[in-house]
Each structure stands twice: as C-alpha cells, then as structure tokens.
Amino acid sequence: RERVEAAGLRVWNIGNSNVHNMPEVTLNLPGRDLKIEEYKQYLRNLAGAGIFYTTYAHMGNGIWSSERETTRGGAPARAFRLDTAKGYWASKVFEGPLTHGRAYTNEEIWENYTYFIRQVAPVAEDLGIRIGIHPDDPPVPELGGVPRCIFGCFDGYVRALEIAASPNIGVCLCCGTWLEGGSGMGKDVIEAIRAFAKMGKLWKIHFRNVSAPVPHFVETFVDGGMMDMWKVMKTLREVDFRGALIADHVPEMAGGRSAGWAYSIGY
C-alpha cells in the first residue's frame, strides 16, 4: 500500500486466492474451521495494512471454462461450453461428473454459507472492512455435482445478504458473469445495479462483456459483446456509484497483456 500510494494512487482492494473459492468452506470439507480462521486473519491483516475492502467468492469447485476461443479480430479469450468445461482455481482442476465424489444439495450449500458468513461478518464489522461477494462464474444451476444456488441469481443474493444481516457484507457485481446467466439471473444487469445500489450494497463492479448467455459464451472486448456497456456506465452514474470499477478477464491483444487492459480502461 505504501509503495502504491507513494505514486499518488490509492489501494482500494486486494485479494488472496488462498481464502477465495474455498471448497473446505463451501462444501464443509475437512479443514473448514481452519480455513475460516485463516480468512479472519486475512481480514485482520488487511485492516493492519489500512485496506478496508475485499472481494470474496463462494464457489466450491472453481471457475469453469473450456478451451480458449477467439473474439473480434481473432483475439484469444476465455470461453465456456457446458459439455466440455472444467473448473479451475489456484492451480487445481475440477472435472465432472462429480468433482468431489458426490452430489450436494442446495440445503447443504446454504447451511455452509450461513456457517461461514455468521462467523466472518462480526470480524469484518469490528475491523471496518467491507466484503463484496462475487457471483458464481458461470451462474448455472449445478456444475460437477455442486449447486450454484446462492450467488447464481438475484434472489439468492437477497437471501444471502439477509442471512449475513451485516452492514459490512455486500456485492461485487461482475457484469460479465451476470450476463452469462441470462434470464436465469432473475434481473438483467441494469436492474441488478439499480436494486443493489438502492440497498446500499453495490461496492465493486467488474466491467466486462460476453458474446451470449450460457450454455456457450466467449468473453469479448467491452464494446463487442451482447451488452451495450455504455448503458451500464450510464446506470452507474445515475445511481451515484462510488465504489471500485475494474476491467476483468480482458481478451488478448497484440502488444502484450497491458495493451488489452489499456483498451478496456480507455473505454
């Protein structure tokens, strides 16, 4: 933080893949309580460094993708096909039909979330840290025997926020993920922005676009997908959004990684 702020910038958010998408927590696997304690210590470390926002994701078997495909101009980009996708997270690969040896029920996933969030939220409150929860990516009903019943639709988010019952638990709205879910999300991305902002829970935006909803999509340049992202930006202005907004999952461009990111940030 000191290094970045010496350049006249501000650190808003930082992440730690060890306490993000934790199967032990989402699926109640051995080591769950140790992982929850690790997460609490991570929050304490953030506060000690003077950083008071972090994003959390609650997927039990990673982010699912297929082989990369191409978007406009032949640019390589992440893709998803329901029949060939696998889960990936922190050097782990999750493959179906059952990534953890059995099918889980919606009730189990809800119980495990409740167990986690009711221990974590009071710590976040004491430290003054806000936690924005990322949607399941992709938001389909089930992958590898694991339901995506909480952060895979608007109603799931509402119930999850009610269970947390905390001013420090809110939303990191990934526009791309929300678009992937299509009508299954219950509200489109514009409606979701307005609803979460009205709740005072909209804290971070992942600004990206995709070609189509599941079962098959390719991530696109921000100006080349199914959504007119100018409308998203306009809506954020209308609701007086004051959180963090970042580019995300940027397709490759000639000139290296920074070129694609510059294109998205410039947009």
Image (spheres, rainbow, N blue to C red):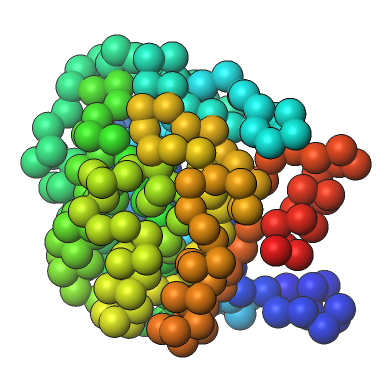
Furthest residue to the left?
Answer: 107
Q: How many marks?
A: 0
Is residue 236 left or right of 100 when viewed as pictured?
right
Is residue 228 left or right of 2 when viewed as pictured?
left
User: Residue 34: where, in percent of width, then height?
Assistant: 37, 46
- Depth check: give the residue in front, 51 or 103: 103
Which residue is rendered at x = 47% and y = 61% of the image?
55
User: Residue 174: where, in percent of width, then height?
Assistant: 46, 56
User: Residue 58: where, in percent of width, then height?
Assistant: 35, 47
* Quadrant location, the N terminus: bottom right
Q: Is residue 149 above or below residue 227?
A: above
Which residue is rendered at x = 61% and y = 80% of the image?
50
- Depth check: give the residue in front, 3 or 236: 236
- Depth check: give the residue in front, 145 or 246: 246
* Quadrant location, the C terminus: bottom right
Residue 24 found in image quarter:
top left
Say whether residue 36 is visible. Answer: yes
Residue 9 found in image quarter:
bottom right
User: Residue 246: where, in percent of width, then height?
Assistant: 61, 63
Q: Is residue 22 above or below residue 241?
A: above
Which residue is rendered at x = 27% and y = 80% of the image?
199
Which residue is rendered at x = 42% and y = 61% of the image?
173
Say whether residue 38 is visible. Answer: no
Is residue 161 left or right of 77 when viewed as pictured?
left
